[in-house]
Image (tube, grey):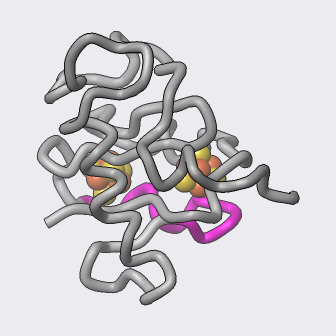
Amino acid sequence: MTYVIGKPCVDVMDRACVEECPVDCIYEGARALYIHPDECVDCGACEPVCPVEAIYYEDDLPDEFEAYKDDNDAFFSETLPGRDEPLGSPGGAAKLGPVAADAPLVASLPPQQP
Ligand code: SF4
Ligand code: SF4
């Protein structure tokens, strides 16, 4: 099980959640952040600090954000534009740094209004 970042993060990305994560498993893409489904330890520390309520436990995802579970996973399991291979399990977002690409669903969205 894992926590998932949904649509409200897109084009917001204030990174408040990153500061809370004890295992550094929240990774930065170009337009959104993504939780690594295997590295997340389900502590829940990130969820209440998100100012736009983008973070949900996967079983609690509203229907409208259900597709973001697979999209968070795809950020790591699929080869993103401009990269040669999937990110896989980097073992820490800080050492990887921001990734200049997004998972397919996030990348397909028009610019989100604040
Ligand atoms: S639930 Fe905990 S481990 Fe998982 S992303 Fe949030 S802060 Fe990190
Ligand atoms: S706190 Fe919420 S809006 Fe901010 S980066 Fe994390 S998921 Fe995105």
Residue drawn 17% across and 52% down? Answer: 41
Residue drawn 58% across and 64% down? Answer: 7
* Residue toward you, 7 or 95: 7
Q: Is residue 49 above or below residue 81?
A: below
- Give percent across and percent down for residue 93: 36, 24
Q: Is residue 15 above or below residue 111?
A: above
- Give percent across and percent down for residue 36: 26, 43
Q: Is residue 101 above or below residue 41?
A: above
Query: Is residue 68 shown left or right of residue 89?
Result: right
Residue drawn 51% across and 47% down? Answer: 17
Q: Is residue 87 magenta?
A: no
User: Which stretch did the figure color magenta?
Assistant: 43-54
Q: Is residue 47 magenta?
A: yes
Question: Which is the main secondary structure of the residues drawn in magenta?
Answer: loop
Residue 8 image-quadrant placement? bottom right
Q: Is residue 108 above or below residue 80?
A: below
- What number of labels is visible? 0
Which quadrant would the C terminus be assigned to in this image?
Answer: bottom right
Query: Is residue 3 shown left or right of residue 89?
Result: right
Query: Is residue 69 shown left or right of residue 104?
Result: left
Which quadrant would the N terminus be assigned to in this image?
Answer: bottom left
Q: Please, which residue is most extreme toward the right here?
A: 114
- Give percent across and percent down for residue 6: 50, 64
Residue drawn 25% across and 59% down? Answer: 43
Query: Is residue 113 shown left or right of residue 82?
Result: right
